[in-house]
């Protein structure tokens, strides 16, 4: 099917408007659909503009195989001025993908390091020449074929300028012709161990959980002087107490807002929670001791997050979702486990036409095949 910018913008208006009504503003949203840069830069910019107008923080999902000219045309308006002050992109790089320019059939992840660096360098050039700031994530699918290379990718990519490294154990979803390995051999625990090996540190995650523990695992920290330090030590009772106070006080507050509004929000927080500053100072002192004061002062500290997203096989998602739609709890333990994970899902797709949010695994396993057929009819190749 063809890539149609007008169709994309119209659909986004409906989806983002629905998300704003049911979930409010100030949340992240991904612009995803095969390869986002198949959209022309003007259509891509229009799509991001729609998402921003509806209070979303858009992230463009790409394989990173585009040139600086495309990025510049996306970021600047017709008069060469900044159309965006800030861009978020996620680049997907792994040796399982074929057809990348320069390395069409990589055999090892190390063959893609130059492409990973080039991706970051494009945004660094844009910031240097036009002042457009950025936040970049790195995505990688993991199978038995490249599991033993996760540590090396982590070690190299965490120093390239990415703010997040995200790994996805492969699941049996989509075209069966691509299922050439035993994906079940790669568990979320196995991937996490490899990431920790690459970081050279334990990655605490249980103290801050999003969604089901079988689906998501996240470690937040700071990279300074080449060394990663967690923001919170899950084995320190003082850090856990500071976490509880912070979450109780802040809740769903969005700190990404104009300075005046941010100052007002912070003032209200301090009035309502007068013990917050003292706890914050204590937490900052503990973080400085863990990371090292000199590293924080001179080691160019920046945020660094590690994530694993484990999607489910279509064979269990479909019966689980169909039973949930009927209000039934499955008897089969694997299907029931899928229902539990779907119920806790934090990654949803908007379907305004049905007045519902759909878990990502349902979208990919159940809805995408039917929707792709309709899109092929609606947007045929010329």
Image (cartoon, helix red, strand yellow):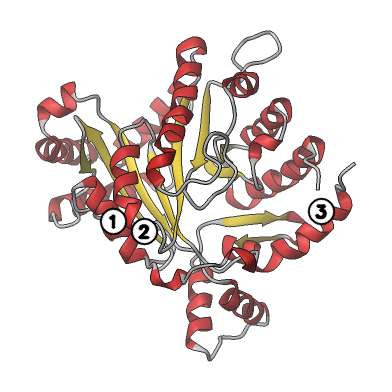
Q: Nearer the viewer, mark 2 or mark 3?
A: 2
Q: If you read the primary sequence from the N terminus, does the residue marked by circle 2 or circle 1 appear first?
A: 2
At x 62%, y 45%, the residue is 32
Contact between marks 2 and 3 (CB within 8 A): the answer is: no
Rendering coords of residue 294 (x, y %): 11, 25
Residue 301 is left or right of residue 183, and the answer is: left
| Residue sitting at x 52%, y 35% | 89
Which numbered tag is attached to residue 147?
A: 2
Q: Residues within 10 Å of mark 3 (few under 14, many from 20)?
A: few
The residue that disc 3 covers is 375
Dot 3 or dot 1: first in sequence order is 1
On the image, the x and y values in percent for residue 126 come to 51, 17
**Vertical position of residue 167 compared to residue 289: above or below:** below
Circles 2 and 1, Cβ within 8 Å, touching? The answer is yes
Marker disc for residue 194:
1
Give the x, y percent position of residue 67. Answer: 59, 25
User: Is residue 194 shown left or right of residue 126?
Assistant: left
Q: Residues within 10 Å of mark 1 (few under 14, many from 20)?
A: some
Please give left or right for residue 111 compared with residue 224 in the image.
right
> Residue sitting at 49 percent across and 68 percent down?
181
Look at the image and tell me whether residue 256 can be seen. Answer: no
Task: List the single residue furthest toward the right.
Answer: 382
Q: Residue 308 has which mark?
A: none
Q: What is the crowding at mark 2: few (fewer than 14 residues within 10 Å), some, or many (at least 20)?
A: some
The part of the image, by quadrant, that contains residue 4 is top right
């Amino acid at each position: 099917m063809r890539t149609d910018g007008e169709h994309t913008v119209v659909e986004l208006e409906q989806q983002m408007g629905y998300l704003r009504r049911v979930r409010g503003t100030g949340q992240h949203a991904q612009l995803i659909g095969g390869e986002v840069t198949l959209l022309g830069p003007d259509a891509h910019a229009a799509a991001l503009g729609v998402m921003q107008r509806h209070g979303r923080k858009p992230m463009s999902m790409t394989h990173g195989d585009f040139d600086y000219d495309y990025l510049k045309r996306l970021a600047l308006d017709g008069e060469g001025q900044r159309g965006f002050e800030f861009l978020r992109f996620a680049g997907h790089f792994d040796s399982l993908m074929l057809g990348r320019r320069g390395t069409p059939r990589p055999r090892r992840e190390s063959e893609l390091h130059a492409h990973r660096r080039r991706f970051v360098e494009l945004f660094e050039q844009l910031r240097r020449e036009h002042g457009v700031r950025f936040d970049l994530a790195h995505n990688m699918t993991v199978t038995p074929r490249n599991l033993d290379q996760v540590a090396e990718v982590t070690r190299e990519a965490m120093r390239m300028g990415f703010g997040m490294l995200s790994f996805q154990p492969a699941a049996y979803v989509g075209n069966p012709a691509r299922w050439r390995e035993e994906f079940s051999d790669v568990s979320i625990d196995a991937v996490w161990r490899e990431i920790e090996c690459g970081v050279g540190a334990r990655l605490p995650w249980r103290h801050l959980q999003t969604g089901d523990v079988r689906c998501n695992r996240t470690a937040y920290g700071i990279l300074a002087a080449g060394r990663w330090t967690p923001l919170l030590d899950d084995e320190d009772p003082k850090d856990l107490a500071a976490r509880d106070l912070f979450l109780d006080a802040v809740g769903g507050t969005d700190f990404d807002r104009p300075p005046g509004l941010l100052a007002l929000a912070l003032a209200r927080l301090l009035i309502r929670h007068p013990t917050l500053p003292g706890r914050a100072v204590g937490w900052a002192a503990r973080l400085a001791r863990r990371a090292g004061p000199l590293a924080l002062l001179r080691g160019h500290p920046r945020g660094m997050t590690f994530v694993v997203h484990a999607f489910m096989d279509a064979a269990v998602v479909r019966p689980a979702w169909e039973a949930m739609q009927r209000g039934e709890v499955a008897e089969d333990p694997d299907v029931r486990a899928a229902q539990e994970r779907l119920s806790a899902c934090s990654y949803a797709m908007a379907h305004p036409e049905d007045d519902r949010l759909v878990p990502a695994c349902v979208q990919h396993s159940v809805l995408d095949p039917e929707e792709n057929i309709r899109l092929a009819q609606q947007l045929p190749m010329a």
